[in-house]
Image (tube, grey):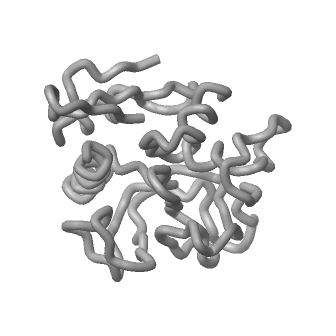
């Protein structure tokens, strides 16, 4: 954890996936250990309600806040990605929100600031659009 | 985590294992889109 924090502090490119997003925040209901605290916010479990299935597993849409080089080749208004998780980020600094997804209400499915970015979904399991996201990340960070 | 150089345009990527994921699928995906074949897992 310490090396990851130093890496990010040095403004080196970082892409977190799934738990890799959650670890960037202050803490999680899932465990007692503190997160990296790179961003403000707490990771909480999806609420048990009605027919809601937990974990949230399968394809769901991520809606991006704005077009950017990171969304090249992706539809900003919504693109399906593959999710597997029971905990999620609901509230954080609005300026770091990259995209959001609806599952029992809106949650933050991607964050970014500078050369640090992270997704709750799995680009590597999201076929062509997921690969496009990895391609965008490598293109940006290779500059 | 990514580093690149002018002599090697293919970025070198370190995939960090936090014990919960499938690193192989991440590594394969990154290599498919241009990461260095020396993708590190650890």
Q: Is residue A106 above or below residue B35?
A: below
Examine the image and state in which quarter residue A88 appears: bottom right
Q: Is residue B10 above or below residue A139?
A: above
Considering every residue shown, the one lying at the far right of the view is: A32
Q: Is residue A46 above or below residue A84?
A: below
**Residue at 73% in and 71% down:** A49
In this view, the residue in front, B5 or A57, is: B5
Q: Is residue A112 above or below residue A98?
A: above
x%, y% of residue A117? 47, 53
Q: Quadrant of the N terminus of chain A?
A: top right
**Exactly how many numbered labels are in the figure?**
0
**Residue at 49% in and 50% down:** A116
x%, y% of residue A62? 42, 70
x%, y% of residue A2? 67, 27
In this view, the residue in front, A14 or A99, is: A14
**Residue at 41% in and 75% down:** A64
x%, y% of residue A22? 63, 48
Considering every residue shown, the one lying at the far bottom of the view is: A77
In the shown orientation, is residue A67 left or right of residue A103? left
In the shown orientation, is residue A102 left or right of residue A91? left
**Residue at 55% in and 40% down:** A8
In this view, the residue in front, A11 or A89, is: A11
């Amino acid at each position: 954890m310490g090396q990851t924090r130093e890496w990010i502090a040095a403004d080196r490119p970082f892409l977190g996936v799934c738990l890799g997003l959650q670890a960037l925040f202050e803490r999680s209901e899932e465990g007692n250990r503190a997160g990296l605290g790179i961003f403000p916010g707490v990771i909480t479990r999806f609420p048990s309600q009605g027919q809601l299935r937990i974990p949230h597993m399968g394809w769901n849409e991520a809606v991006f806040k704005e077009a950017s080089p990171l969304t090249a080749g992706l539809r900003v208004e919504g693109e399906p990605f593959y999710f597997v998780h029971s905990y999620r980020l609901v509230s954080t600094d609005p300026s770091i929100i990259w995209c959001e997804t609806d599952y029992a209400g809106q949650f933050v499915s991607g964050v970014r600031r500078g050369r640090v970015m992270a997704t709750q979904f799995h680009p590597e399991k999201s076929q062509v659009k997921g690969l496009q996201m990895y391609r965008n990340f490598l293109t940006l960070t290779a500059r | 985590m990514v580093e690149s150089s002018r002599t090697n345009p293919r970025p070198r990527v370190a995939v960090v294992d936090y014990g919960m994921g499938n690193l192989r699928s991440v590594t394969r995906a990154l290599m498919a889109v241009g990461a260095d074949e020396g993708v590190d897992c650890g």
